[in-house]
Image (cartoon, rainbow, N blue to C red):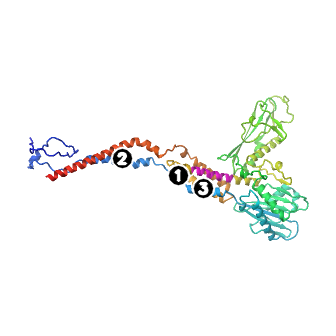
Amino acid sequence: MAEIAGDESSPPLPTSEGGETSGAPSTSSPSDTSGGGGGEPSPRTSKPGRKRLVLTASVLLSFLIGLPLLLSSTEIHRSPLPSDAIAALSRRLQSNPPSFPYGLHAVFLRSGGAPSEASVANRIGRDISAQLVDLPNVSNAGNTLISVTVESAGGCSSSSNVASHWRCRAVITADLVRGDEVFDELLHSALGGGGGDGMRVYTVVFVESDDVEELRIVIGKHRHAWVVGKVNEAEVASIVGKVFVKYFMNGGAEEGEPGIVKREFMPVGSDGNIVLSFSLLNANPSDWVYDWEFGKIGERMLTPVIEALRPIANINIESQVLYHTPKSSYSYSDEKLGGNVLSMGDIPFFMWGGVVIWNPPGCSLGSKPHGTLDKMPSQELMETIEIFIGQLRQLFGLKSSYHAQSTDSVTKFITSPKGFAQWELDLLYRHHARSNLLSCITTLESLSSLVQSLPRMIVMDEIGRQVELSLEAAGLAQRNASLGIISATRARALAEDAFFHPSIMSISYASIEHYFAIYMPFFAPVSLHVLLAVMKELKRYRTYCACELANQAKI
């Protein structure tokens, strides 16, 4: 049996395993007395309470180590967007609206034999430049390069501003008798192919003739016009300015009438697709039922139109024949409009387009046996399609026909089988490029503002790349006139692809406070208890260390 090692109990000592104290007197094992140590306790090899402190601190350390892992698991990938480049492009387009360089070439075909002088061409060129600056609605006259060529029996001379593409002796005054269509093609051949670097060159040819009492102006179907008659130098600048500004730049808009540049652009969707739907409606299918050969005649007439407008829109054609009950709406005659009129309430389903009412010759109720199927005459179908082409021109912001609406009786227009003259297509291309550039920068600004307003928004690398490519295409459209429409269309498409990227639309983005509200109810109580436990064990550890030092001092 072990004996009590003294009359008085020793101070309480912490146990080595847990640091707990006991109020009972300590006992010694047989090994304690066999060593002759006089009943004294053996010295401790470790500080009391260390294991409990290390265990508690390891729990806190595991929380601290897991915190970066938690943050990385909730990290939002945000590809950097070139916000500064977007803002710079927006300021540039607002201060200097997009414009493309033009070339204006005036050619004088003189019937006399006097030699041509370069000083005359230079003087006329300066007068034309001054006239263009003074004309209204010429916001980009500074981008117009002017050249003048004077041709007579003595030779040709040109101004020194721009190299002329005119081929001397290719056209003479006597060619006028061959007709306007032939003369138009002869001028097109003599002018070669336009300016370099993609610049569109528009030409006004003055043909001196004594057989014409008053000036006659003809607008060709390419990029030129010609004036027949006697013209002195004082009138040249005014006539050139009228033809160039009114037709080649503003699409024939009269004074006070908004040109195509100021109108809202054509009904082309963001995907660039247009569907032309043609329907033959039989009003009363009990008799006089008609079919048509649209696939053979209609598509043949519309194919050149579609090809001409392909840089602007991808046009698809569809046709159908429908059989309706007798009409419930009746038109009324309007002498001012020169036709029958239906109110908008009677045809609310028509968005764009029009209706042609065709009454077959000799058609009367009951004069045709039931079930007899007729074909619409080819000539009637061709005239109907020409009407629809005129309506299509109006949808694109042009006049349906200059022949019917021209107030100038001395001006004549050469029609194109494409439905659009080349100078009209240039006008549409330029306007389409401007509209796409403005739409592109608006979309990019909206995307940049959206990303900046949502710090937790995912921005994929693909979105950043699309924005960069859109900015590159927009810059190319401003620098290169020939690639302007293609690059501007691509810039708009890339900007809209970036804005409507699936990664943006598929997730609801919340603020950082939302994430605190989700995770704090779980992590705050657990972290607080672990932190308090560490503080408690650290305090306990210091207390037992102080007791240990005091006991050693007594020994």
CA separation in Å, label 2 and label 1: 33 Å
Q: Are marks 2 and 1 in contact (CB under 8 Å)?
A: no
Q: Which residue is mark 1?
A: 461
Residue type, numbered disc 3: Leu
**Where residue 441 sits in the image (x, y, percent)?**
62, 53
SS at mark 2 in the image: helix
Q: Which residue is mark 3?
A: 471
Looking at the rendering, the stretch of residues picked out in magenta corresponds to: 432-447
Sequence-first tag of 3 and 2: 2
Residue type, numbered disc 2: Phe
Sequence-first tag of 2 and 1: 2
**Where residue 357 sits in the image (x, y, percent)?**
80, 37
**Dot 2 crowding, Cα within 10 Å, few <14, some 14–19, many 20+:** some
Q: Vertical placement of 122 versus 188: above or below?
A: below
SS at mark 3 in the image: helix
Res. 138 in view: yes
The image quadrant of residue 116 is bottom right
Q: Which residue is mark 2?
A: 63
Q: Is residue 358 shown in magenta?
A: no
**Where residue 127 sits in the image (x, y, percent)?**
79, 65
Quadrant including the N terminus: top left
**Dot 1 crowding, Cα within 10 Å, few <14, some 14–19, many 20+:** some
- 2 vs 1, front mark: 2
Q: What main secondary structure does the magenta stretch of the protein show?
A: helix
